[in-house]
């Protein structure tokens, strides 16, 4: 596709997104430099007293979760409530890898990457309720256009939340699969060094892979930047969103609030079930999608069971496991959470963030469902009270778009190639000039590079079939127009 066709394809995609997905329109019109856009993502300093108290609870739980990966006295101990008032909720709990997820940490924090001042840690609430075979991971990570597995094929239905800690053995796997010789000697050296680095990082004897990954992300994040920049890059701390919500709910269930009432009071619970039915991260019983509030640990493998409310209990939808029911009673829920038998759903932990007044930094999909969750809670609280809580939830800003586009590229001749994390690390990371130029790029242009992927997300649900575009520019083609300075 020549330059004129690429430009026309990008313009057509952006035009339809602005028209048919109005929530996305303001972002494609925002011409502030990325650095200025990122600075505006910070939460306001003024916080309602109720939100301040709840944010202290969430921060305390974040520290508790991170200490399992870093131990006492590590980077977890520096996390404060201010550090989680605006937080990336887009990323998955896995090695740094996919360009779209990698970009979220850059966009969300671009304003302080070159601040020249000591910066507090970057906290990301990453989703660990995903399979190793998910689209962004593919059983490992990607390097030079090749998927590098460190999970086995039989683990494809398991979830990261329950997987045990493991050694990284992708070099041995590539050799056994007879794929090792496809890499150049230089790339083989990088893969061997990368595996040694991952296995050498201290994760304090973590039993779970999810805690192990927090240490891996922390240890590899600086390598996305050139050596001279690394001492000044803020720590990146991945706290599993489900773990933070689980720890928080153990405390909240000992108190009275509209969240605890939604779980424990039959009438309030039914109103919540009816209000959020059909929201993509909530539940749709007739379609067999989602779960009521929590997922249940599968008794036979590192997986999850869907739960439905029946007769004041959470009961597995799979009748073979109906005997594993959890009574919807305060103590029973707290004990199941302590045992890690219950895993909060996305709808529940996002509701917890809204309850605490935390600004979720979102992607195109999460912008939609977070808006639906906020509007649903506001309507429920306006009608059924407390009215003060309706006003508090109305104050929560959910418009911080940070996802939907890559930001790391390398030039091959006249074209650009979108880079995965391992590609960036193998080249020694990006230098100050690269970062500064990205920060000067208008946000709408940065976002336009990923517009084709955003279009795919909304095409079936929002764009009339007769008007759907058949020609769309890929990341590499769009980046070649926008980031011609690379």
Image (cartoon, helix red, strand yellow):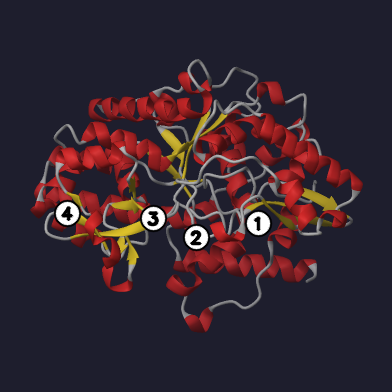
Tell me if residue 418 can be seen.
no
Pointer 1: what residue? 449
Real-space CA distance between mark 2 and mark 3, rounded to the nearest whole angstrom: 9 Å
Element marked by disc 1 = loop
- Answer whether residue 22 is visible to the viewer in this image: yes
Query: How many residues crowd around disc 4 within 10 Å: few (fewer than 14), some, or many (20 or more)?
Result: some
Mark 3, Cα crowd under 10 Å, few <14 / some 14-19 / many 20+, is many
Q: Is residue 481 left or right of residue 318?
A: right
- As drawn, the label of residue 313 is 4
Q: Which residue is mark 2?
A: 157
Mark closer to the chain start, 2 or 3: 2
The residue at 71%/65% (across/down) is 7
Q: CA distance from mark 1 to mark 4?
A: 47 Å
Front residue of 265/8: it is: 265
The answer to which of marks 1 and 2 sits earlier in the sequence is: 2
In the displayed image of the protein, which residue is found farthest to the bottom? 466
Instruction: Tell me: residue 287, above or below residue 151.
Output: below
- Which label number is shown at residue 304? 3
Choose the circle earlier in sequence order: 1 or 3: 3
């Amino acid at each position: 596709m020549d330059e004129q066709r690429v430009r026309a394809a990008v313009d057509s995609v952006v035009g339809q997104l602005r028209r048919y997905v109005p929530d996305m329109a303001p972002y494609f019109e925002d011409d502030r430099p990325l650095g200025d856009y990122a600075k505006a993502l910070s939460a306001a300093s003024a916080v309602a007293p109720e939100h301040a108290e709840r944010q202290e609870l969430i921060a305390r739980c974040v520290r508790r979760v991170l200490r399992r990966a870093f131990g006492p006295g590590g980077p977890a101990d520096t996390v404060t409530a201010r550090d989680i008032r605006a937080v990336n909720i887009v990323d998955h709990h896995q090695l740094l890898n996919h360009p779209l997820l990698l970009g979220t940490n850059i966009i969300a924090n671009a304003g302080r990457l070159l601040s020249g001042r000591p910066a507090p840690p970057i906290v990301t609430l990453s989703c660990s309720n995903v399979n190793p075979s998910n689209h962004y991971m593919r059983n490992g990570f990607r390097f030079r256009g090749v998927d590098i597995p460190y999970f086995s094929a039989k683990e494809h239905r398991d979830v990261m939340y329950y997987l045990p800690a493991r050694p990284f053995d992708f070099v041995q796997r590539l050799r056994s699969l007879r794929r090792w010789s496809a890499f150049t000697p230089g790339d083989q050296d990088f893969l061997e060094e990368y595996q040694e680095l991952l296995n050498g990082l201290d994760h304090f004897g973590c039993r779970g892979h999810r805690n192990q990954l927090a240490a891996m992300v922390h240890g590899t994040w600086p390598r996305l930047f050139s050596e001279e920049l690394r001492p000044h890059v803020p720590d990146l701390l991945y706290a599993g969103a489900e773990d933070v919500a689980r720890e928080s709910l153990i405390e909240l269930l000992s108190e009275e609030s509209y969240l605890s009432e939604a779980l424990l009071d039959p009438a309030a619970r039914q109103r919540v079930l009816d209000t959020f039915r059909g929201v993509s991260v909530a539940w749709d019983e007739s379609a067999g999608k989602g779960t009521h509030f929590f997922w249940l640990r599968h008794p036979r493998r590192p997986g999850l069971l869907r739960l439905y409310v029946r007769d004041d209990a959470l009961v597995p939808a799979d009748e073979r496991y109906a005997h594993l029911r959890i009574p919807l009673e305060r103590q029973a829920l707290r004990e199941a959470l302590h045992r890690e038998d219950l895993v909060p759903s996305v709808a529940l932990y996002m509701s917890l963030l809204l309850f605490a007044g935390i600004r979720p930094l979102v992607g195109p999909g999460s912008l939609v469902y977070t808006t639906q969750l906020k509007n649903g809670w506001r309507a429920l609280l306006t009608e059924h009270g407390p009215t003060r809580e309706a006003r508090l939830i109305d104050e929560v800003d959910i418009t911080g778009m940070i996802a939907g586009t890559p930001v790391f590229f390398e030039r091959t001749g006249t074209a650009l190639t979108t880079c995965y994390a391992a590609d960036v690390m193998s080249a020694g990371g990006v230098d100050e000039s690269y970062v500064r130029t990205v920060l000067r790029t208008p946000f709408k242009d940065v976002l336009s590079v990923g517009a084709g992927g955003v279009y795919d997300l909304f095409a079936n649900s929002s764009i009339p079939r007769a008007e759907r575009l058949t020609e769309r520019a890929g990341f590499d083609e769009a980046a070649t127009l926008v980031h011609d300075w690379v």
